[in-house]
Image: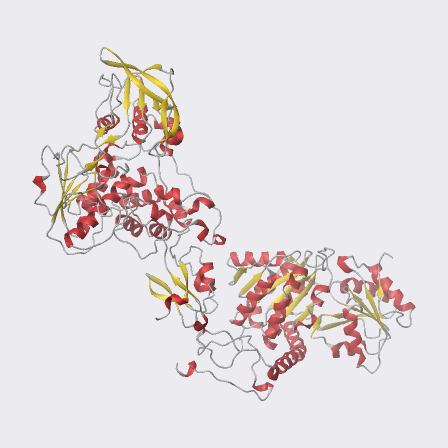
Amino acid sequence: MKKVVTGNYAVSWGARLARAQVIAAYPITPQTSIIEKLATFCADGEMEARFIKVESEHSAMAACIGASAAGARAFTATSGQGLLLMHEVVHWAAGARLPIVMGVVNRAIGPGWNIWTDQNDTLSQRDTGWLQFYCETNQEVLDTTIQAVKIAETVFLPAMVVLDAFLLSHTSEPVDIPDQAEVDAFLPPYRPELKLDLDDPRAFGALVLPSDYMEMRYKIQKAMERAVGVAEAVDHEWGERFGRSWGLVERYRLDDAEIALVTSGTVTGTSRVVVDELRDKGLKIGLLKVRMFRPFPHEKVRQALAGIEKVAVIDRNISFGDSGVFAQEVRAALYRADKRPPVFDFVTGLGGRDIVPATIREIVDYTVAHDAPVEEFTWIGVKK
Amino acid sequence: MKKQTEARVITFTSEAEMPMMPASMASTLYNKTGSWRYMRPLYVNKTPPCNAACPAGEDIVMYLQLTAQGRYAEAWETIVRENPFPGVCGRVCPHPCESECNREHLGGAIAIHCQERFLADYAAAHDLGLPMPDVPQRGEHVAVVGAGPAGLSCAYHLRRMGYQVTVFDAGDKPGGMMRLIPEYRLPKEVLEREIAAIVATGVEVKTGVRLGVDVSLDDLKDYAAVFLAVGQSRSRRLGVPGEEATGVLPGIDFLARVARGQRVGLGEKVAVIGGGNTAMDAARTARRLGADVTIFYRRSRAEMPAIDEEVNEALDEGVRIEFLRAPVAVLTENGHVRGLRLTEMELGAPDESGRRRPLPVAGSEYEVACDTVIPALGQVADLSFLDAEVKSERGRIITDEKAATTRPPIFAGGDVATGFGTVTAAVGSGKRAALAIDCFLRGVERTFPDLAQNVQAAPRPHDAAVVRFEDLNTAYFEEEPRPRQEQRPAAERVTTFEEVNLGYGEDAALAEAQRCFSCGTCNECDNCLIFCPDVAVLRGPSDDEPFVFNYDYCKGCGICVSECPRHAISFEEEVKFAET
């Protein structure tokens, strides 16, 4: 069934089709309509889920942790400051190996107070042990939400499905909403390895001594490493069932490319247009979209960029005192490559400033004009 | 089970042996965290303010709970375990319960009287009879004098305890002062039904027997006990010249004649003297008979003893009220009333009733014309039947808190002893006497609260502490308005004796019962069960004990106490329970 829905409603439909059993959430712009829609689904009896109203994002995640520990499929959604308030228990969910799925609408961090899109909120959660997927379209948002549940429950790690504020969250697109029966066939009920059981009570989250703590971390990392293959298999299965798959990364016109743009989120769509336009003018340019950011698909990135002469990463975020975060990851991945192309990093579009084709052309022009970066990264569009 | 209670230490030698999540590999049941507790939660129902304020000792909160569940017959039975007159009280009681209701702070007090009336009407519509407990019949025979609300309540409660009861009444029908309540407030069929239901429990009623005339106290000495509930049947006199003129008609006499269906000629203009409910009843009845009615009251509106709604309804019906006016003389012509001489009054220092004493304003006298004067200054008891051994004081028979007079086994209650002046208080007084007579006849010692407090015949276990609004967890309650009761329009009312208040239908009654906070009284909302972080709240063995604490694991965190919306969980220091 095709419906015209916003990115936020695509998240809601994903959670509904994934048969989330407990939803605990707190409103925050631009996420709110995700949980409003879910609350409506619950109230109308269209979802068999318990909707828990809480007083903060910290409590929202805490409630999801409790629900997930009790064996329920738990879902929440947040954005920006809400995610930051949640931070302590974001770590907890991963440490407790609870496969909670969370929709996160990328929103800039204040001050200056700003509700528009910017990746610093989710990227600040990079090291929490959560899987992270960055989406380009509303269809991808819906598909990824359902896929994330399956991947998370296979490796017992929580997952964030990330979408840009307004550019996806509040923009409507035609979205194919799969049949419930088909989703059920794809996604079996959650089967926890260990859950809260009143008849056989255990202590959860208790003290772990130095003699054992490192092994717990080792297991999380092993699960992350395993998640690369699991995510690929799940996406493949999805493609077979529903005729669409997204890849952990996507290569676009890269085969004979000399310059590669590296993008994430909605910048990808704009970049495709510019790549096509420049290809028509004879420039050998392609694009690598990074969809899965954690675990970072190092091998896939290395393979995709092998033989590329120059790499230009577009970062809608900044790690103060260093550079854009995606560029850090790409450089790190390429360090183990036989041939390491120069990596140009462009920080732009912060706080929701539009990234338009002209912005991307400027990035490409800079990359063409320089043999190698002359600075750690380059600001694009700053009023100097 | 024994195995599970033993602690086990597991040493891991490789990550493969370790669980994925930091959770203990063995059961933690051995760890009885209840030993950490220094505060103990306890399920203790408290007293809701409505229950505390009900003169008849009704378990209001419980019948609201049952109503909220649609269990109307059980709700009605809950009332009639305490008060056999819900149809009457639901209509005429000044509902002190509502004045104390904690809901007042969040949308308005629960319309308890409408609930009571709804349940009584439900019982009537479904022809429910008063259920009698299965108790052994007792040989003792008790005489009750006066078939008003106190006497009939006493007789009913004695019957419930298995006693034989004969009620004597001077009137030609049982009911006492309830018979004088005008039809527009209390339809006669409502009264008749509830009296008939009491008689049907096996109470013998002998009417037309006046104590002191047809029978004396000594004649009753063969009864195991006697309960005197003769009420206050004499009108207070105006005490002004001209009072003997024709056209001066005491309020209760007027109401009695109308109640009996007699024609009463009032003329065009009627002056009613007084500010109580009898004055309102007389004024509104006179309006319905076509008269132009003015009430003269010697104090101001704030001091009026009449129920506020009654005053407003009288005003709506076109009754005028002149405050700070007192009659000085009834003006007559040929032995008939032609008017009143009145004086203006002003309020001085408070008197023994706490109200400011009205004092005449010198030189303020004036006259008004009227055809009928209805004094309604309250009633006094006719105590001419008393002997020297039954002591009285200021017109009332002296009783202790067990309703006993100075001459056992004679007991007394209702207005003749208390002077409380409402049906509901009389019902409570009669019940108190019944319980006290039972104790007396069985030789059982029991303490009774003082006369200002109510007594319950079928009390649930509860703590005497009355729940205040501050005791509730109001996070669980939203402001919801009290629904309005439908009323007949005032213009229509003055043409008919049809009932003014039209009560609540089932939907409104159900919704209103669900608005009740259930102060201090568990209604199994499950909050404690849901919130307990230690799974130390368990479902209990019966409806009487819906939840129990598993003190082996309750750490005494108090979350159940604070999340109980209605203050039905107490929190006590553990040291109080230590074995000494």
Q: Position of residue B496 (x, y in %)?
A: 31, 27
User: Which quadrant of the figure contains the C terminus of chain A?
Assistant: bottom right
Q: Position of residue A164 (x, y in %)?
A: 71, 61
Relative side of A127 to B160, left or right: right
How many labels sit on residues?
0
Q: Quadrant of residue A9?
A: bottom right
Residue B559 in the image: above or below residue A214: above
The front one of A210 and B515 is A210
Relative side of A24 to B29, left or right: right
Relative side of A364 to B290, left or right: right
Relative side of B241 to A377, left or right: left
Residue B199 in the image: above or below residue B2: above
Give the colouring mode of the picture.
secondary structure
- For image coordinates 17% across by 35% down, the residue present is B173
Q: Position of residue A287 (x, y in %)?
A: 80, 69
User: Which quadrant of the figure contains the N terminus of chain A?
Assistant: bottom right
The front one of A35 and B14 is B14
Q: Position of residue A67 (x, y in %)?
A: 53, 68
Residue A243 in the image: above or below residue A217: above
The residue most toward the bottom is B13
Whether residue A33 is visible here, answered yes or no, is yes
- For image coordinates 8% across by 40% down, the residue present is B218
Whether residue B538 is visible here, answered yes or no, is no
The front one of B411 and A260 is B411
